[in-house]
């Protein structure tokens, strides 16, 4: 009888221990899994709302009729949209070769080009009046 009781008791202890283990462990695992999967998830939306809300448009800055930082590489994919901005302290006409778009830029009057990337290749973007290349537009096929 006492042996049976002891066995029953130890069985009960084991069952309780297992139950406690199961209850405690998954919650511990869950919270750590949730935390680790949550923090990257929290990090990317935190980064996401600021930027993709307004897609960054490449900006070509012109100072003293020269592109700041040298001739800017603007790369797009055919079928997409070519989009860039020119901020200039020099009044001139911006000419996008190949596509043959012209726009006047002036100090305090930046311009934005936006057009479908229909032609692949590499094209000069220049200050037309000065014949100064400010950017190289590359449209990948
Ligand atoms: Cu030109």
Image (cartoon, rainbow, N blue to C red):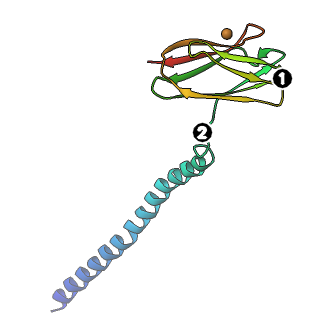
Name the residue rendered at 20%, 85% in the picture: 8
The answer to which of 10 and 94 lies nearer the viewer is 94
State ligand 1's quadrant: top right
Label 2 packing within 10 angstroms: few (<14), some (14-19), many (20+): few
- First-in-chain label (1 vs 2): 2
Name the residue rendered at 51%, 50% in the picture: 40
Where residue 9 sits, quadrant-wise, is bottom left
The answer to which of 4 and 123 lies nearer the viewer is 123
* Residue 14 versus residue 63 in the image, above or below: below
Residue bearing mark 2:
55
The label shown at residue 45 is none
Q: What kind of element bears circle 1?
A: loop
Name the residue rendered at 29%, 80% in the picture: 13
Q: Position of residue 86 (x, y in %)?
A: 72, 25
Q: Position of residue 53 (x, y in %)?
A: 59, 46
64 sits to left or right of 74: right
Quadrant containing the C terminus in the rendered view = top left
Where residue 98 sits, quadrant-wise, is top right
- Whether the residue carrying mark 1 lies under 8 Å from ligand 1 is answered with no
Q: What kind of element bears circle 2?
A: loop
Quadrant containing the N terminus in the rendered view = bottom left
The label shown at residue 89 is 1
Mark 1–mark 2 Cα distance, whole angstroms, equals 24 Å
Q: Position of residue 15 (x, y in %)?
A: 26, 78
Name the residue rendered at 72%, 29% in the picture: 111
Label 1 packing within 10 angstroms: few (<14), some (14-19), many (20+): some
Disc 1 versus disc 2: nearer the observer = 1
The answer to which of 139 and 46 lies nearer the viewer is 139
């Amino acid at each position: 009888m006492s042996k049976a009781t002891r066995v029953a008791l130890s069985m009960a202890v084991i069952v309780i221990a297992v139950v406690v283990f199961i209850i405690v462990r998954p919650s511990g695992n869950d919270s750590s899994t949730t935390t680790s999967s949550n923090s990257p998830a929290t990090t990317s939306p935190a980064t996401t709302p600021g930027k993709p809300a307004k897609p960054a448009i490449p900006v070509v800055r012109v100072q003293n009729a020269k592109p700041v930082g040298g001739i800017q590489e603007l790369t797009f994919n055919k079928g997409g949209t070519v989009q860039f901005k020119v901020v200039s302290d020099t009044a001139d006409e911006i000419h996008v070769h190949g596509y043959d778009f012209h726009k006047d830029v002036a100090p305090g009057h930046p311009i934005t080009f936006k057009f479908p990337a229909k032609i692949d290749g590499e094209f000069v973007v220049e200050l037309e009046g000065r014949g100064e290349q400010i950017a190289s537009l590359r449209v990948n096929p």
